[in-house]
Image: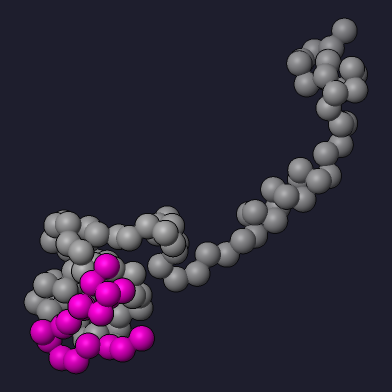
Amino acid sequence: MANSLKDALMQAGLVDKDQPERDKEKKRRENIQKKGPEQTGIHTHHIRTDCDQCKNCSPDVEFYEHRNRQLTAKWLCVECADKFSISDDFRQTKQSSHAKSGMFRRFYGHTKRF
């Protein structure tokens, strides 16, 4: 008699004894490397609207790879980026609704063109 449901299903022939395809797929998914801002778990069809610094909802939140040591947040609204004097050259995304429609403007320095 089988000790577990899995053993019983294998004896009945419903489950393969060795599942190489399933193991290959599991290893392949583990080896996929994520790049850039996608590591945060935000899908490409979603727009991020919450600023990590001020915790407010804003339509102009972008990802900045800055070197400002006063600030640990990377997803910043325009107001926080201007307040902490972060250049627009450090902006990595053009994901906000203002950036897509061409209304994204910085008050500190120039506005980067993508």
Residue range highlighted in magenta = 97-114
Q: Is residue 45 left or right of residue 24?
A: left
Q: Residue at x 88, y 31 (%)?
A: 17
Relative to 42, residue 69 above or below: below
Query: Who's the residue at 77% across and 50% down the image?
Result: 24
Residue 65 seen anywhere in this rendered image of the structure? no
Q: How is the image coloured?
A: one colour
Q: Position of residue 103 (x, y in %)?
A: 20, 78
Magenta-colored segment: predominant secondary structure: loop
Residue 56 lies, in percent from the top left, at 14, 57
Q: Is residue 84 above or below residue 76?
A: below
Quarter of the figure with the C terminus: bottom left
Residue that appears at 83% across and 39% down = 19
Q: Is residue 55 in view from this perspective?
A: yes
Quadrant of image for the N terminus? top right
Residue 80's image quarter? Answer: bottom left
Instruction: Give the number of marks.
Output: 0
Query: Can you give x and y, in whole percent of width and height, for residue 77 in the image?
Result: 18, 69
Residue sitting at x 86%, y 36% = 18
Please state which of residues 51 and 100 is positioned toward the viewer in this rendering: 100
Q: Position of residue 46 (x, y in %)?
A: 37, 57
Does the segment drawn in magenta span residue 40? no
Foreground of the two, 101 or 44: 101
Q: Is residue 28 left or right of residue 69?
A: right
Q: Is residue 80 left or right of residue 65?
A: left
